[in-house]
Image: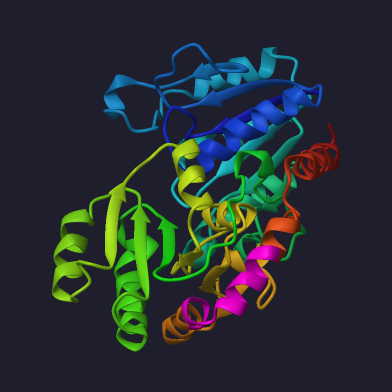
């Protein structure tokens, strides 16, 4: 099968959609399919595993945006001999929006996957989504949680779940730790939507109850809130508890997870929670909000602890740090039980979507 993957974002940019589309391309090729990528992301060093059409423009100043790409994309899709177009959408994804319009307008079998929680965007997106469905497109989201908004936009159309995938070999487990301090980690863009301010509040509540020396917390990532977070850490008296190591590569993150004890996720409007899945795959007990897509990769009481709100999240963190028996039991389960979202399974689901679209 010849597949066109269409996405605003693609490596060398870093982020959830970028890494997932890049990995999906490689995994489809590994499964015997032919893949080409159309993206508005510039750059690349020529080491791509598939053919990548970078329909970028210097006028965008490095952003993955190009409203002038439509004619060239239409030519590539019309003349490329593709069996299916797979468009990857976020809340703000003008290139993918254009690609969905082009692919369905050409009558090309089209699968649309949302990597976001539409929330209030569901209503304004509705007319376009329903137009694409009328042209034959099939809909999916990376989780059932994310699919709820897509279903509202599509007025009840079937929305399949096509989860993000993971390679367990890339996230090896370390030994189950014991003793104090318990090493808590998280990975996030340091931006308001990721609720890193709320994360500090949760850590402060837990630290107050646990006392000095109970835990350390490393927050990996970069973003515009870093200066504010540094000041907030000092104001909360967490200078000896919370560290901001910055952005690191995926292998470096895997190495950090192998020596950690607990993963903490404060996000709410999280479509899937790939960082939580990576931590769970590395064997870490995950504590997270249950009103997010993380609930589909973490089973409460089995692979982690889920909370209804931030107060509950602080309670869960206290439990995991204070109760070594609970922490060890969950860690051993995660180390011995691979997650359901391995790439072989995700590729099967993706191909099923392509066939549902008419490929």
Which residue is farthest front? 179
* In front of the other: 123 or 296: 296
Residue 250 in view (yes/no): yes
Quadrant that contains the C terminus: top right
Above or below, 280 relative to 299: above
Residue displayed at 47% across by 66% down: 265
Above or below, 93 relative to 242: above
Characterize the magenta stretch by its predominant secondary structure: helix
Q: Position of residue 338 (x, y in %)?
A: 74, 53
* In front of the other: 121 or 305: 305
Q: Position of residue 335 (x, y in %)?
A: 68, 57
- Check residue 86 for magenta coloring: no
* In front of the other: 197 or 98: 197
Residue 144 in view (yes/no): no
Residue displayed at 75% across by 44% down: 346
Q: Is residue 194 left or right of residue 263?
A: left
Residue displayed at 73% across by 23% down: 29
Q: How many marks?
A: 0
Above or below, 32 relative to 311: above
Q: Position of residue 195 (x, y in %)?
A: 36, 66
In the image, the segment drawn in magenta is 319-332
Quadrant that contains the N terminus: top right
Above or below, 21 relative to 12: below
Q: Position of residue 333 (x, y in %)?
A: 71, 65
Residue 294 falls in image quadrant: bottom right
Identify the image's colour scheme: rainbow, by chain, secondary structure or one colour: rainbow
């Amino acid at each position: 099968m010849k597949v066109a993957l269409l996405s605003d974002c693609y490596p060398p940019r870093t982020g959830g959609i970028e890494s997932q589309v890049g990995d999906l391309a490689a995994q489809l090729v590994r499964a015997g399919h032919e893949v080409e990528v159309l993206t508005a992301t510039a750059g690349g060093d020529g080491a791509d595993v598939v053919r990548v059409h970078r329909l970028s423009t210097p006028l965008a100043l490095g952003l993955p945006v190009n409203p002038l790409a439509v004619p060239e994309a239409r030519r590539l899709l019309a003349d490329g001999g593709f069996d299916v177009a797979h468009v990857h959408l976020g809340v703000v994804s003008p290139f993918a929006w254009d690609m969905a319009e082009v692919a369905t307008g050409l009558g090309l079998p089209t699968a649309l996957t949302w990597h976001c929680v539409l929330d209030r965007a569901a209503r304004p997106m509705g007319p376009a989504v329903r137009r694409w469905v009328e042209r034959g497109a099939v809909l999916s989201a990376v989780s059932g949680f994310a699919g709820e908004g897509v279903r509202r936009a599509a007025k009840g159309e079937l929305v399949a779940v096509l989860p993000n995938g993971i390679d367990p070999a890339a996230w090896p487990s370390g030994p189950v730790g014991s003793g104090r301090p318990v090493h808590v980690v998280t990975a996030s863009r340091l931006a308001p939507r990721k609720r890193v301010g709320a994360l500090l509040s949760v850590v402060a509540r837990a630290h107050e109850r646990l006392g000095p020396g109970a835990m350390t917390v490393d927050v990996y990532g970069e973003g515009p809130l870093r200066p504010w977070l540094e000041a907030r850490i000092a104001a909360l008296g967490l200078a000896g508890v919370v560290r901001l190591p910055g952005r690191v590569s995926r292998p470096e993150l895997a190495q950090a997870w192998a020596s950690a004890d607990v993963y903490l996720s404060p996000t709410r409007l999280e479509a899937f929670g790939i960082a939580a899945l990576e931590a769970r795959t590395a064997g870490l007990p995950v504590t997270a909000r249950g009103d997010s897509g993380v609930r589909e990769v973490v089973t409460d009481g089995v692979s982690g602890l889920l909370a209804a709100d931030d107060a509950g999240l602080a309670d869960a963190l206290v439990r995991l740090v204070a109760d070594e028996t609970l922490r060890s039991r969950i860690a051993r389960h995660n180390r011995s039980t691979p997650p359901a979202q391995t790439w072989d399974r995700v590729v099967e689901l993706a191909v099923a979507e392509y066939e549902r679209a008419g490929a």
